Amino acid sequence: MIDLHSHTNESDGTFTPLELVELAMERGVEALAISDHDTFAGYDQALPEAKSRGLDLVCGIELSTRAPGAGAKGRAVHLLGYFLRQPPPADFRAWLAELIEGRRDRNRRLIASLREKGVEIELAEVERLGRTLTGRPHFARILMDKGYAANYEEAFRRYLGETAPTFVERYAPDVPVAIRRVLDAGGLPVLAHPIRLGMRDLNAEETFIREMRDAGLRGIEVFHSDHRPPDMERYSGIARKYNLLVTGGSDFHGDIKPQILLGTGFHGNLNIPISVLNDMRASA
C-alpha cells in the first residue's frame, strides 16, 4: 500500500512532517509522497526521519493553477508534481517563493475584506497558525476559534469560499505554464483529483484532460478519496486512452478531514499498489 498525496502542517495539514512519517509507519504505508501546497518545507523536514525509519519518501508538490481556453477558462485546477530522480532545482524553488508571496498578497487583501464586514482578525494570528504557507484553512480555524463560524464548512460558506461576500481571489498560473515549470525542473506533472474539476459534461472533461496531455501532462490521479469506483474506472480509461500514468493518494490532511485516513482514504476506498510508483519511476 502506498500513498502519493498527503499534506503536513507546513501547508494545510495538521500533522507535523515527523508525525506524518510516524503515522505512515504505523499504518504500513510502503511509500509516501508529501505533496504540500507550493512548498517543500514538509518534505525537507521529513526526509532525514524517513531515511532513518526505512520509509520510501517521495518528493511531491501540489500547485494551484487556472485553466486557460474558452471552455474551462478560469477554472481552478490542482497540479501535482513528483520529483522521482533528482531533487527540485533552485530555480523551481525560487518560482515557488513567488507563488507564496502571491498568497501573502491575497491574505492581506482577505484580512481587509473581512474587517470591512466587521470580522476582527489580524494577519499575524493567522500566519502563526499557517507557518510556511498560510491559506484559507488557517483563516477558517481562526474564524472558528473567535466564534464567527461553527465549523470549516460554515467558515468557507460565509467568509472564505468563492461564493462568499468576502472572498478574495489570488494569483494562480495557467496550468500549461505550471506543467512546463515542473517538466523543466525534472518533475512529473500529474492532474490531481480530476473529479474536482466539476465538469458535468464528461466529454468536455475528457477534452480538457487531452488538452492538458498535449501541453505536457504526464499522469492523472485515478485513485483518490473523492473518487467513487465508477470515477476511478472512467479516469483509468482516460489514462489508457491518452497514454497517461496512473497515480493515486488519499489527500490526507489530518484533523481537518478526519474521515480520510492515510493510505486507505475515505472509508477504505483506497489500496494503491506499489506498482503504481514503480511505473512512475520507470517513466521518469
Image: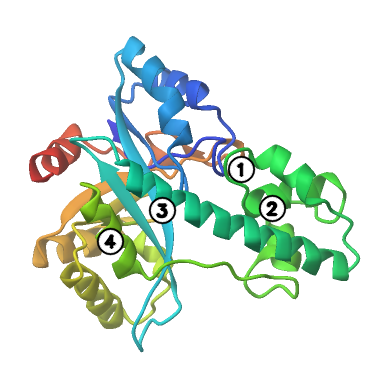
Report how far apart the C-alphas of labels 2 and 4 lie in the structure: 31 Å
Q: Position of residue 203 (x, y in %)?
A: 25, 81
- Mark 2 or 1, nearer chain start: 2
Question: Which of the two residues, 170 or 226, is positioned nearer the viewer here?
Answer: 170
- Residue bearing mark 2: 152
Residue 163 is tagged as none
* Mark 2 in CB contact with mark 1 (< 8 angstroms): yes
* Residue 239 drawn above or below residue 17: below
| Residue labelled with disc 3 | 95
Q: Amino acid at mark 4?
A: Ile
In the structure shown, which secondary structural element does the residue marked by tag 4 occupy?
helix
Q: Give the residue number, with chain letter if any, for mark 1.
A: 256
**What's the residue type where badge 2 is placed?**
Tyr
Q: Position of residue 228 (x, y in %)?
A: 36, 57
From the image, which quarter does the N terminus lie in? top left
Q: Of tags 3 and 2, which is closer to the observer?
A: 3
Q: Earlier in the sequence, mark 2 or mark 4?
A: 2
